[in-house]
Amino acid sequence: KTYIIQKLNPLLEDMVTECLTEMPNDPVEFMIKYLRENKSSGSKEAPSDSLQAENDQLKKEINSLREMLKHGGGDAQGTTDGDNDSVVESEDEDDDDYVDELPDNFVQSQAQRNKARASVSAEAYGAWNVKKEFTPPVYPKGDEQKARIKEVLSKSFLFAALENNDFAIVVDAMKEETVSAKERVINQGDDGDFLFVVESGELEVYKKFPGDEEEKMLKVCEVGDVFGELALLYNCPRAASIEAKTDCRLLRLDRETFNHIVKDAAAHKRERYESFLKSVPLLASMDAYERGQIADALKPVSVAAGEMVVKQGEPGDTFYVIEEGACEALKERDGGEQEVMSYDSGDYFGELALLRGEPRAASVKAKTDAKLLALDRRSFKRLLGPLQDLLVKACDRYTN
């Protein structure tokens, strides 16, 4: 525990905060570079000498504590038959083992324990780190209001993996808030204790990058979008500022409810899809933040071998990426269907109808049992806009 508090926590807090602020394309390379620079700029004292000095200091503290206990306990430190040698021997054996009581500066004050953590830390396990019993807040709502909130939350990636009971708890714990145009909801660098879901209106995301004097507008949050979740997922300061573009109605969820109900399911989904999306050639030019936004919006779809996913001539509102399995594209020619394309894991289809607003140019059928990741029209336009030129060029594969 001492090693975690004194050694690992400060290093991990600074490194992860710096990584989330910079959002590099290759976070592993960034963190390796950070650690090397941190090492070179740190103490030049030989590691072995530093550890030896620290070990000696700890031994002195241990002996001092034992003396205090010995004087306070009197004869209770000895054995019933007066064999004091056994006491000394036992103390020598335990010298490098453990401290009976932690020094005062190792123990958090009551105020510190009640305060939400504002940075990333390496949490150890044990009886002293057990989660306290949680009772979620409940804000009374009518049936119409609950139905409206459920409809909005169903559009958000964070809540897609929740079971029905957990979903109902989150709906009850949501608090509605209204903000006026030009009002700042969160500010970059602040600590965060809430996430927000957009129920109505639009908000703009601003970020000030190192070396820049002015903020840059990165994106617009619309109905169903979530913001403020990074501070809760990773216990880090706000990565960007959010300002209302119009009058808005927001749904606010507190940190404790998020941690107990939503966090594990959402983090697992994001990590799984982000890892997969790195292997999709189309998304190679996107940075980790952009891929993360796509991962948030994806919805899983399972199809059986022989099942038709899209049909030629029908309107199309969904873009698909194949996570597992294989599919084939078929076109009606000379009175029959002819295979014109084969898809494997990492391939995508369905973009033509969304780009051009035309009916499906071909049918797509599952050759094997397959797992697909679907992106609706609104998310496709918003998140894949920067890739539109690449997508248009790729559309030629259907006509060649």
Image (cartoon, grey):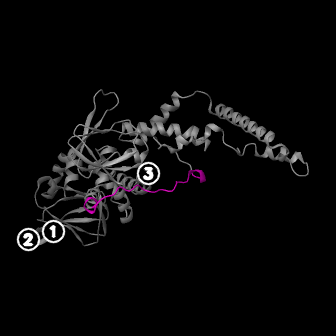
Alpha carbons under labels 2 and 1: distance apart? 9 Å
* Residue 338 disc label: 1
Q: Is residue 280 visible?
A: no
Rendered-image quadrant of the N terminus:
top right
The residue lying toward the viewer, choosing from 168 and 350, is 168
Residue at which label 3 appears: 256
Q: Position of residue 376 (x, y in %)?
A: 22, 57
Work out whether mark 3 precedes mark 2 in sequence or the reverse, and give the earlier one: 3
Q: Residue at x 42, y 39 (%)?
A: 29
SS under mark 1: strand
The residue lying toward the viewer, choosing from 74 and 230, is 74
Q: Which quadrant of the structure image shows residue 71?
A: top right
Do labels 3 and 2 touch, CB within 8 Å? no
Alpha carbons under labels 3 and 2: distance apart? 62 Å
SS under mark 2: loop
Find the magenta span and give its range.
125-146
Residue 134 is one of the magenta-drawn residues: yes
Do labels 2 and 1 touch, CB within 8 Å? yes
* Residue type (three-letter) at the residue carrying disc 2: Asp
Alpha carbons under labels 3 and 1: distance apart? 55 Å
